[in-house]
Amino acid sequence: MLFVGAAANAQTEYVSDELEVTLRTGPSTQNAIVRILKSGTPLTILERDSDSGYARVTTNAGTEGWVLMRFLSSEPVARDRIVVVERRLGEARAAGDKARQELSELKDQLATTQQRLGDAESANADLVRELNDIRSASANAVSLRDQNKTLRQRVVDFERQTDELEMENRELRSRDTREGMVIGAAVFLLGMLVSVILPRLKPKRRSDWDF
């Protein structure tokens, strides 16, 4: 009898789609049945007997025995595979729903970000216009300040010229007054001289008694 494998190299196989498989105490139908294994029961292979076609196995519960290798499969039975596939399909669907939800949230975030970006660009344009207005107003203020300075200087010059003209006018009035007084005095003296001299210049009338 040839035994292949050992517990160190144990691997898991499954009872095939047969409805029930006997787990026996030895590698033959003459050995007593330990228990009946249902389809899909996982078994750990401890060793194989190629001559008898049996394999020594142990269940997850620790029950050890022999089963026919032709009733074993390296993959779970179709029913269990369907359960696994359905579970994975459900997980995939849940993951897809979650991904779609996340995608929807990302789209909303993108729309919000784009709206904020548009608002920021609009606010930036407003700030640029306001800055240009401030610069223009500042330039106008500088120009007005220069003009105001020039006007103040002109006012000062005008006031100075006015003061000079008023002084000249006062001097002229004072000189005219003096000249008027001199002329008046001269006229008065001339009148007095005339009143004194003219009587003397008149020829005396001869008396009728003069011969």
Image (spheres, rainbow, N blue to C red):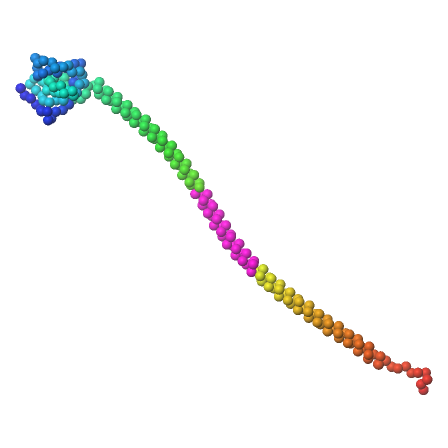
Where in the figure is residue 9, as x and y percent of width and height?
11, 26
Find the residue positioned furthest to the left.
Answer: 1
Q: Residue at x 71, y 72 (%)?
A: 179
- Judge whether 35 appears above or below 211 on screen: above
Decide which of 21, 117 is in the foreground and name it: 21
Where in the figure is residue 154, as x and y percent of width and height?
57, 60
Question: On the picture, is 201 further left or further right than 80?
Answer: right
Where in the figure is residue 183, as x and y percent of width and height?
74, 73
Check the picture and name the quadrant holding the C terminus: bottom right
Residue 14 visible from this viewpoint: no
**Image quadrant assignment for residue 1:** top left
133 in the magenta segment: yes
**Image quadrant assignment for residue 27:** top left
Find the residue positioned furthest to the right.
Answer: 209
- Judge whether 173 appears above or below 11 on screen: below
136 in the magenta segment: yes
Q: Residue at x 73, y 71 (%)?
A: 180
Question: On the picture, is 145 further left or further right than 23?
Answer: right
Question: On the picture, is 183 further left or further right than 87?
Answer: right
- Judge whether 150 appears above or below 211 on screen: above
Residue 148 visible from this viewpoint: yes
Q: Residue at x 56, y 58 (%)?
A: 151
The residue segment tinted magenta is: 124-153
How many labels were placed on the picture? 0
Where in the figure is residue 178, as x and y percent of width and height?
70, 71
Task: State whether the magenta stretch is mostly helix, strand or loop.
Answer: helix
Question: On the picture, is 161 further left or further right than 139?
Answer: right
Q: Residue at x 36, y 30 (%)?
A: 104
